[in-house]
Image: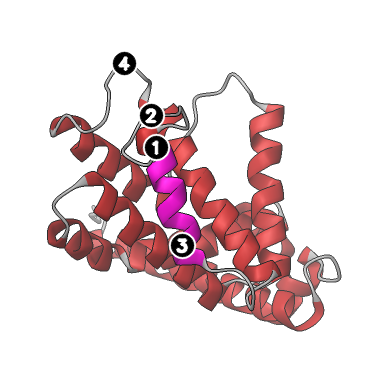
Amino acid sequence: MELNNPSDGNRYERTKEKTKQKIIDVAINLFNKQGFDSTSLEQIAEKADVARKTLYNHFPAKETIIIEYLQRLVRKRAPEVDRMLQEHADTRSRLVAVLNQLTEWSKEVMTKDIFRVYVSYQMQKIMTSPNEEMQRSGAKNFLAEIILLGQDSREIRRDVPLEILVSQVDNIRVSAGMRLLTDPEKFTAHDYIEKSVDLFLCGAKYGSDNNR
């Protein structure tokens, strides 16, 4: 009787991963060259030299390719964020540092077209499944970690659900990225992020800080 070789499963996973990465690389290249709307899944499958069924099994929609692409980039840079969290001792400095870094990364890897699709797809998920528990991924995991650290140090209140707090901070990231891509010459991301973080932490009520 033949025993299953454990390496067979590993080989299958490696092949699967190589296929996914090839599809992502080809798709992003096509999106950047000819635009998201002008690129079809069929064209991606042809350029990547994979069967359409294989492509659909991995990515049922073009938008999911972009989401996976961005999530992989964020995961790859997770060690850098971990170092930043250790270097900064309070919630405000952590939020400002990480949001600035995430915005810079967005500028490096996103075009206006890709950013538009990313935001539209995320909004569509919220609108079509409003009662579904929000799943954090990528940048939101970093922000959630900062919020939890802030709660542990009693800098952030605990009576508000974590997902609401994370969403509020993530709105700063999305808004900063959108403005930076739209008007990079006039928009100062760092100043915007600092003021937005202060607003998140201190509120807009008059007299909530020393700037009266």
Mark-to-mark CA distance, 4 and 1: 28 Å
Instruction: Provide the residue designation for mark 3.
Output: 191
Local crowd at mark 1 within 10 Å, few (<14), some, or many (≥20)?
few
Q: Which quarter of the picture shows residue 32?
A: bottom right
Tell which circle, 1 or 3, labels the residue nearer the N-terminal end. 3
| Tag shown at residue 212 | 1
Mark 3: which amino acid? Asp
Residue at 38% over, 44% down: 198
Tell which circle, 1 or 2, labels the residue nearer the N-terminal end. 2
Disc 2 on helix, strand or loop? loop
Instruction: Tell me if residue 56 can be seen.
Output: no
Mark 2: which amino acid? Gly
Mark 1: which amino acid? Arg
Mark-to-mark CA distance, 3 and 2: 21 Å
Q: Quadrant of the C terminus?
A: top left
Query: Could you tell whether 60 is left or right of 80 in the image?
Result: right
Instruction: Provide the residue designation for mark 4.
Output: 159
Residue at 80% over, 67% down: 42
Local crowd at mark 4 within 10 Å, few (<14), some, or many (≥20)?
few
Instruction: Provide the residue designation for mark 2.
Output: 207
